[in-house]
Image (spheres, rainbow, N blue to C red):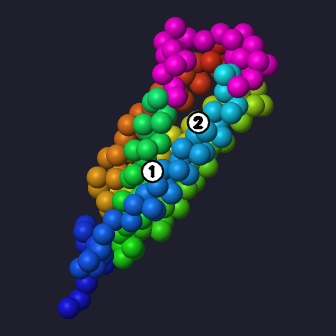
């Protein structure tokens, strides 16, 4: 029997079961990179807190205590989406999709050191726009492999687009 490689549901084997250890690896790496970024946030450095507090910000900035729980949920959601794509080991689009996911994850981790660590609003804006585009690319790569995984990335795209708009507003208000 011939196995269709480009089908929406790739064959994984008769006795195939989800690999929960790999899922924990995906979730752990996403949360780990998120934790790395959080180390540059105002809560970890008095100097960064003073710098960020001195910036003019738009009125629609969400409260600071929203960021950690929202990011935690988004990291788990996007890691689960990537894991579901990883499970499709016979799909031709799997590796390029995971490459796009890795790129956007690295851009995500680079934003906080650029914005908070280097105190560079412009570098943060460049990275946030690049990240938004990389997430769109990831969604496009996920869609043929696992359509639900592509949809699981949409809330993340929305939050990052919001964060990019916020970064842009801070950039405009602080010439």
> Where is residue 128, by image quadrant?
top right
Give the residue at the far bottom of this rendering.
1
Q: Is residue 40 above or below residue 50?
A: below
Residue at image mark 2: 128
Horizontal and vertical percent position of residue 6: 30, 74
Q: Residues within 10 Å of mark 2 (few under 14, many from 20)?
A: many
Quarter residue 158 falls in: top left
Give the quarter of the image for residue 131: top right
> Which residue does the image show at 71% across and 36% down from the upper left?
113
Placement of the C terminus among the 4 image quadrants: top right
Label 1 secondary element: helix
Within the magenta stretch, is there residue 152?
A: no
Specify which label sits upstream in the sequence, 2 or 1: 1
Residue 58 higher or lower than 34, as above or below: above
Q: Which residue is mark 1?
A: 79
| Image quarter hosting the N terminus | bottom left
- Main SS, magenta region, reads helix
Q: Residue at x 66, y 22 (%)?
A: 43
The picture places residue 12, in percent across and down from the top left corner, at 30, 75
Q: Residue 5: give x, y in percent of width and height.
A: 31, 78
Residue 121 in view: no
Residue that extends furthest to the left in the rendered view of this protein: 1
175 sits left or right of 107 in the view: right
Could you tell me how many numbered marks the image carries? 2
The residue located at (65%, 10%) in the rendering is 56
Residues rendered magenta in the picture: 44-68
Label 2 vs label 1: CA separation?
19 Å
């Amino acid at each position: 029997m011939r196995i269709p490689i480009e089908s929406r549901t790739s064959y994984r084997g008769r006795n195939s079961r989800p690999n929960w250890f790999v899922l924990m690896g995906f979730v752990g790496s996403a949360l780990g990179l998120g934790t790395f970024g959080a180390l540059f946030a105002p809560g970890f450095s008095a100097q960064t807190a003073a710098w960020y507090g001195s910036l003019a910000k738009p009125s629609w900035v969400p409260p600071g205590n929203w960021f950690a729980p929202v990011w935690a949920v988004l990291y788990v959601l996007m890691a689960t989406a990537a894991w579901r794509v990883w499970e499709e080991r016979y799909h031709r689009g799997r590796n390029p999709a995971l490459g796009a996911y890795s790129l956007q994850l690295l851009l995500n981790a680079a934003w906080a050191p650029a914005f908070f660590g280097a105190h560079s609003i412009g570098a943060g804006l460049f990275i946030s726009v690049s990240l938004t585009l990389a997430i769109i690319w990831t969604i496009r790569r996920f869609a043929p492999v696992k359509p639900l995984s592509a949809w699981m990335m949409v809330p993340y795209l929305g939050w990052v687009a919001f964060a990019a708009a916020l970064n842009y507003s801070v950039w405009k208000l602080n010439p």
